[in-house]
Amino acid sequence: MSQATTHAANSPHLEPGEGEAGTVRAHHDHHELGFLRKWIFSVDHKVIGMQFLFSGLVFLALGGLMAMAIRYQLAWPWRPMPGLAWMFPATGGAISPEFYTMLFTMHGTIMIFFVMIPLLTGAFGNFLIPLMIGAPDMAFPKLNMFGYWAMVPAFFFILLGFFVEGGHAAGGWTSYPPLSTIESAAPGSLTGQTCWLLGLTWVGVSSMMGAVNYVTTIVKMRAPGLTMMRLPLTIWGLLITSLLQLFALPVLTAAGILQLLDRTLNTGFFTPTNLQVNNITPDSFLYGADAVGAAAGGQPLLWQHLFWFYSHPAVYILVLPAMGFTSDILAVHARKPIFGYKPMVYSMSAIAGLGFIVWGHHMFTSGMNPALGMTFMVSTVMIALPSAIKVFNWLGTLWGGRIHLRTPMLFACAFVSMFIIGGLSGIWMAATPVDIYIHDTYIVVAHFHYVVFAGSLFAIFAAAYHWFPKMFGRVMNETVGKVHFVGSFIFTNMTFYMMHQVGVAGLMRRTADPYAYDVYQHLQPINEFITISAFCMFAWQIFFVVNFFHSMFWGKRVGRNPWNAASLEWDAPSPPGHGNFDRQLEVYRGAYEFSSPDVAEDFIPQTRKL
Amino acid sequence: MNISSAALPAHDPAVDAPKPHHAIYDYDSGPPVNRGKFAIWLFLATEVMFFTGLIGTYIVLRMGAATWPDPADRLAVDITALNTFFLIVSSATMVKAVERAMLGDNPGLIKWLALTVLIGATFVGIQAYEYAVLIKDGNLPDVDIFWSTFYAMTGFHGIHVAVGVIWNLCILIAAIFRKIPQEKYMKVELAGLYWHFVDLVWVLLFTIVYLM
Amino acid sequence: MRYFFTLMLLLVPILGVWTFVEADRWQLWFPQNVSSFGGEIDGLFNLILYMVGFTFIVTELALAWFVFKFSANRPGKAVFTHGSHKLEMIWTAIPAVALLFIAFSQMETWAKVKFESNFPKGGKYTKERPIAELWASQFDWRVCYPGDDGAIGTADDLERSYEFVVPVNTDIVFHLRSRDVIHSFFVPEFRLKQDALPGHTIPVWFRAEKEGIYDLVCAELCGWGHYKMSGRMTVVSQAEFDKRMADIKAEWFSNGKEQGQ
């Protein structure tokens, strides 16, 4: 570890009311910190970012393994998985239907709430925000620490669920009641669902603490001269994401707690009257008596409204920071100012604003009033517009550039390429009559994996390669990085592209054995192809893992600004020490002054006075 | 020079090594609002959305129900009206407490804050009593959707009041043992903002759950 | 290397379009359509397919071309520009118009399929007098025909599990209900999907134009047995339908079900 981090990770002791304009406070904290204070109970935003990064990567591996098991079952239903007989002694290694429902439920939950959100906002948000705005740390470093520590009970509950009776939650990551609230409806609704709800509530607490901190930091702690319209687009993406979290997440928290009450105190928020679960007696089959024993009179659709009121903005939470990373990386490696900076900012804001009025498009076939469906269609179709503007501006940024095809740039270009696919296929889902047919089919699966996996995760890879030198003072191996990119790009497309056609053929998601239906039997070979591609794609990530950890310790040393980038984080030492910067910053321009004819070099740092 | 050369700049210890004895630069940008106050407003925005979710649930369920009992038949409206009055009074005492804190008048702060804590605790106590009577009569949350929503709405608000009382109590203890100097008045003001928010939500909840 | 990476980016639109062109031949396309509105839905799908397909090809080709052209090792700096107001206007206005066109082109079909005001009127089956109630429960489908009096919920109702028999070329309205959790009625050949919501009775209409036996699929996760919650949608001629109803009735009452029970 370099000299700089040896005295990192100490509190700048910011308290409300302190730190008024332009004050410079010398710090006297040169004493060594113990391991616990430095790495576990750290209040340094860089260390907290690392904590989010590593726990996110661990959960990424877990969620990825689950995806592999799902794909195995879809290609070869009920066939024992080689070498896994010890895990499932009852079936000799084969996946049971109960286990399959649990698998895709937890795959979705873990990937969204324990991988993408923590990686995008927790890891990169934490690491980059103070550095990119020229601040010594977050506005509330202790709150930041609690933000990570609130994830610990979340980890505990979400892992505990795997070991309780009946297994983990199995009502889908959307947890639609009554399936998720009535204990007799599914094995996972015994105790697993309670663990799921508690886990998510803690994720919500963590995100809320983070979001308050991020917004306050970005608004209140920018370096002198760094106006809002000079901020890098990464910061804009994270700011808008945080605002989305602030306004959307509490609604999910409220809904989650109500579902928890339905499960524990037998309240009836989502339980309609006359339910009869697992009590089949043919004579009383129709118009049977209330057999659930909870207060009834609730509405299952209400959960869907509350859930999607958060979870639709959540998909923008999953992609807006990724859009920010991509914008920054494209500009730096194409040596060009971002094309249309203001339209980029406005379109991100428009996505966030419209994001609050499109949730109903998840519910076109749910029994919601169809007139409402029509209005949601219009708003949903229009949200494609800001995304289109962003794509055109990225293309404009590349045009006329001097492109360096380094690994981060390749991943950023792949993000644009695959975000186009994911964005365009969304229009089918928005169109109500088409959605009658394709709702809950594999087109939807293809669509959101193109946005969140091929899009956001590729942007996370791009960001990891791009900001790795700032994190560790070393650069990741370029050749291995390119190998990682080529395989990931090819296998990702092989995995997800054909899901579109499978979806058009009508194949539904969440089905353990689609071939039980005649209409789907001919889809087995293509599912086998998808599965093998997915296995290759998963295995290929070994290049990233090895490169990441090897380069952390033995990578090539680089200086403060290895990419000749213009934004503020490259002014700090690599890796930055306690307090981040070792000189007084003054900002004179935006973050994208590349190839200006005014200077000999092809970039002007934000801090250089001309 | 060939600018598009892909070679990375080499590591140069003279430039790249961190400078020793650097200082922490802490700037303040943006609107002239204290950071803590800014963050509290953001937090209150999340609270507004939280209660929007709860109240929205209540409205949807009530509108969708075939019949809805008259709250006056089931709830002790008069006692709760008195309780509502207490909570509104406690907002006024909180205003006085913040005013004293701004002036650096520590004894005044202690007096008004203690009053606020007392009234807040009374509110929680009366609500707990109300719950106890209801539960004794068998009106549990699993009886019907009226009681489900009633306990959820008032319960979450009650928890918020309790948190507010504890927060104010902490400040009160600090004021008694350490004094809160004039320049730290923000500590009191932040708690005050939260307290007013909790009061405001109650007025809304009382209206829709008890009166309508 | 730039040739190689360009080729990779280029493969996306080339293979992407190719798979869509070939999909039909590989049976990776719509199953046959037998409902009266299914053709419209397929048409609207294709309308969007052509519009987004065009955008897909143009943007992906532009991306590959820019990456190829501007990654060449050449002297001088990049073009120094911060954007173009005119271009922004163009690429805001054109997609906006195209997207609004898509939205408005969808409305008629949507209203036709789902608006209760547009349900078949005057025919044999209406919203008030449905052909049957279709009950979903974990993990089977049950049909409740009204019997001779034409009203559901009376003593002469006929219950039948698994198979839903309807006459061809007739406007069918049925009531979809769920006994426990949320299920979804989906017949791929009808292009029709509707969730069954516990506590609600949802009227659904369709008109099948070809006799045959079709899979009735549950399309909403309903528990561990979701994958096996299959049913059968049997479309027969009117004469055959009458005969089937008589059979069902005979079977139902011979199984110890007395009228008036």
Image (cartoon, rainbow, N blue to C red):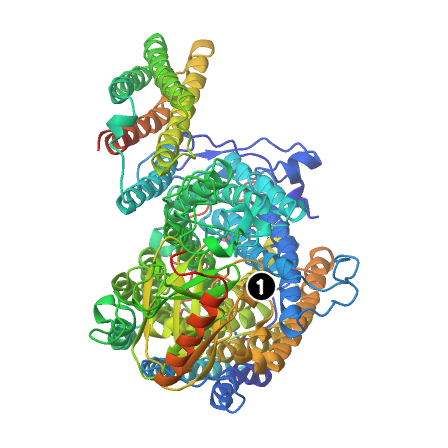
Is A383 left or right of A541, judged from the image as shown?
Answer: left
Q: Quadrant of residue A89?
A: bottom right
Percent position of residue C194, x then y: 38, 66
> In this figure, which residue is indicated by the disc labeled 1?
A461
Residue C45 seen in the current view = yes
Image mark count: 1
Q: Quadrant of residue B175?
A: top left
State the residue at coordinates (36%, 44%). Answer: A297
- Report the quarter where the C terminus of chain A lies: bottom left
Q: Residues within 10 Å of mark 1 (few under 14, many from 20)?
A: many
**The numbered mark 1 sits on a residue in which chain?**
A
Front residue of A404 and A277: A277
Front residue of A552 and A517: A517
Three-letter amino acid code of the residue under disc 1: Phe
Is B200 left or right of A261, judged from the image as shown?
Answer: left
Percent position of residue B19, x then y: 60, 44
Instruction: Classify mark 1: helix, strand or loop.
Output: helix
State the residue at coordinates (62%, 82%). Answer: A525
Is B48 left or right of C14, judged from the image as shown?
Answer: left
Residue A571 seen in the current view = no
Percent position of residue A221, x then y: 41, 42
In the image, residue C67 sits, relative to residue A464, either above or below, namely below
Front residue of B203 and A557: B203
Percent position of residue A342, x then y: 32, 62
State the residue at coordinates (26%, 45%). Answer: B63
In the image, residue B211 sits, relative to residue A419, either above or below, namely above
